[in-house]
Amino acid sequence: MIEHFNYSYAYYEYYYTNKYLGNGVSSQTLIRSFTMEQNPVVEVKNVHKSFKSVHAVKGVNLSILPGHFIALLGPNGAGKTTLVEMIEGIQKPDRGEILLLGKKWSGNEEEIHRNIGISLQETRFVDKLTVGETLKLFASFYRLNNSRVTEIIELIELEEKRKAYVQNLSGGQRQRLALGIALLNKPRILLLDEPTTGLDPNARREVWAILKKLKEESKTSMILTTHYMEEAEQLCDYIIIIDKGRIIREGTLDQLLNHEINHKTIEFTLETTTATAELFIPCNFEIKYDDLSGKGSAYINNMETELPELLSYFRKKDLTLKNLECRKNTLDDLFTSLTGRHLNE
Ligand SMILES: Nc1ncnc2c1ncn2[C@@H]1O[C@H](COP(=O)(O)OP(=O)(O)O)[C@@H](O)[C@H]1O
Ligand SMILES: [Mg+2]
């Protein structure tokens, strides 16, 4: 049983607290549940991958339990695709080990393929096939019949497009078709690489709706890569932030945002045009100010006590405000505080 606990402490703590203790479950049930369903469906152990001089993935460890949706959140070039393609068996790690359903890729290809669904960052379809024909073709690889094709077409809401050529689909419809293909074989593990990148907000929400429904109705586990913090927030139980090939922070949304020291951001614009960044150095707060745009941000913990203090500092320095806004920190704020960059840079 001990080896079942072989995943990161943060994830263990999250799972234990949320799934069991939070629901008032007795410790006996807890032990039973752990022995029954604790085996991770995906385990990545100290995995490295380089392309010539680029060290794309630098010693990543992660572990996913059944039914969990995990986000790999990071900017372009973070190593997300390389990592997810190693899990998918498309690329081989230089070092480390990857297990799916407890098995290595090598020697277990057929069994693993039966249990996973993949949607790549860019999916190429045969343009001269219709939606229905495309799904039928993929269904034939798994020896699935037409009724599964119909189920999938309903799930991805492409009934009206069943006879449309793939080349005439919108970006969102193509992504839904790619998702449909990945789901054909009712996979235990679903791996999605940037499923909504480049889609407009409506098309993005349609993809999210399908994934939310899947989470409610099935035991599928999912790893999704994205640089949209909203996507990770909306869909995933657990978020792994990756940058430059390394995991830099991980946890539930709540753990990531509320356990930071300064968890609220105040954004302000000054009317005063003569202010400079140096003006804010003696202040008690962590303030970033850009004298070109006149815009600044302050990071605080307690709005009731610290906001008045900040306002009196402005008054003392004769600074006039044009605008001030207080908001809860986001995952992008967290990323910026850790790296100095934004997620979408
Ligand atoms: N086939 C490749 N050859 C050379 N460099 C690569 C290759 N694939 C990825 N890289 C590099 O590895 C790093 C990580 O890339 P990638 O995994 O695609 O990141 P992400 O998916 O997070 O944008 C980048 O610096 C990228 O340029
Ligand atoms: Mg990528």
Image (tube, rainbow, N blue to C red):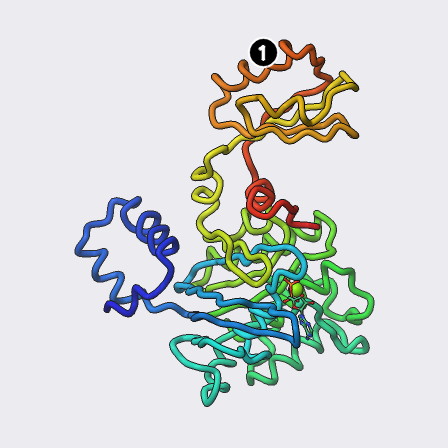
Whole-percent x and y of residue 223? Answer: 52, 63
Give the image location of residue 173, x and y in percent: 72, 61
Q: Is residue 286 above or below residue 308?
A: below
Amino acid type for the residue under numbered disc 1 = Ser
Above/below status of 310 relative to 153: above
Q: Is residue 205 left or right of residue 161?
A: left
Q: Is residue 255 left or right of residue 337?
A: left
Residue at the spot x=80%, y=71% of the render? 165
Residue 309 locus on image (x, y percent)? 53, 15
Q: Is residue 262 left or right of residue 332?
A: left
Q: Quadrant of residue 34?
A: bottom left
Front one among 180 and 251: 251
Q: Which residue is mark 1?
A: 312
The quadrant in which residue 127 appears is bottom right
The foreground one among 189 and 270 is 270
Number of other residues with Cα within 10 Å of mark 1, as a class: few under 14, some 14 to 19, many 20 or more: few
Ligand 2's quadrant is bottom right
